[in-house]
Image: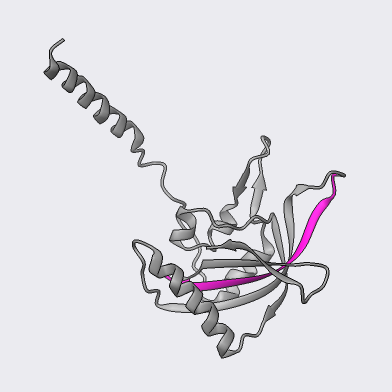
Amino acid sequence: MNKSIIAAVIGGFVVVTALLCMNPNEKMYQKQKHFDTANDVLIQLGNNDILDVDKNEEVHETSAFKECLSKRKRLTYSQVNFQKMKIEKIEELDEEKKKSIIEDYTKLQERLAMSYTPTKIEPVRLDVKAISPYKDENGNTIENDFIIDLVMVDEGEGMVIDYYVENYIGDNKNDRKNINVKG
């Protein structure tokens, strides 16, 4: 076979493959709600499931949870692995703690290829009881205590979560361990 015919067939294959991969109907989740304050987002988190487990035992983020996430978090994996989050306390942050959380968030933002500057940044620290989407070996619900740092930003669609760090709390409330769930 002629080299030009082989090149044309390979080129046609590449073009057809590229066209098949571009499906305009399969877009990123589009937000429906506008949250004016960080408290509105927290109410949404506390009142709704975060993850669902389907009949094949695959875990998926719920639409109610995706409403709380920034574009970046909706496009990538959110890092949240709870079926439900019971907010037990919203901690009051002094200026030093706020500054520390925002600096960590800013460092993360600087590493992104297409970082942006949100119009509003609000750090939040939560004490939560997290309910796992999975059961233990006896079929019981798994619950754990966590301290979660969030950074809520306004990126034009209202307040959303753009940063998440979870710290596991053992049996002792002072036994705080960062389990490297961050993003």
Q: Nearer the viewer, residue 115 or 133?
A: 115
Q: Quadrant of residue 22?
A: top left
Asked whether residue 181 appears in the rendered view, the answer is yes
Q: Which residues are magenta?
A: 139-157
Asked whether residue 156 appears in the rendered view, the answer is no
Residue 3 lies, with reference to residue 110, above or below; the image says above
Q: Main secondary structure of the magenta part?
A: strand
Asked if the stretch drawn in magenta spans residue 49, the answer is: no
Q: Nearer the viewer, residue 37 or 136?
A: 136
Q: Quadrant of residue 177?
A: bottom right
Q: Residue at x 77, y 62 (%)?
A: 144
Q: Residue at x 17, y 22 (%)?
A: 7
Asked if the stretch drawn in magenta spans residue 155, the answer is: yes
Q: Nearer the viewer, residue 170 or 87?
A: 170
Q: Position of residue 81 (x, y in %)?
A: 65, 55
Q: Position of residue 53 (x, y in %)?
A: 67, 44
- Tell which residue pokes out farthest to the bottom in this image: 95
The image's colour scheme reads one colour
Q: Which image quadrant: the N terminus?
A: top left
Q: Residue at x 59, y 67 (%)?
A: 165
- Tell which residue pokes out farthest to the right in this image: 138
Residue 163 lies, with reference to residue 65, above or below; the image says below
114 horizontally vs 125: left or right: left
Q: Position of residue 148 (x, y in %)?
A: 64, 70
51 horizontally vs 163: left or right: right
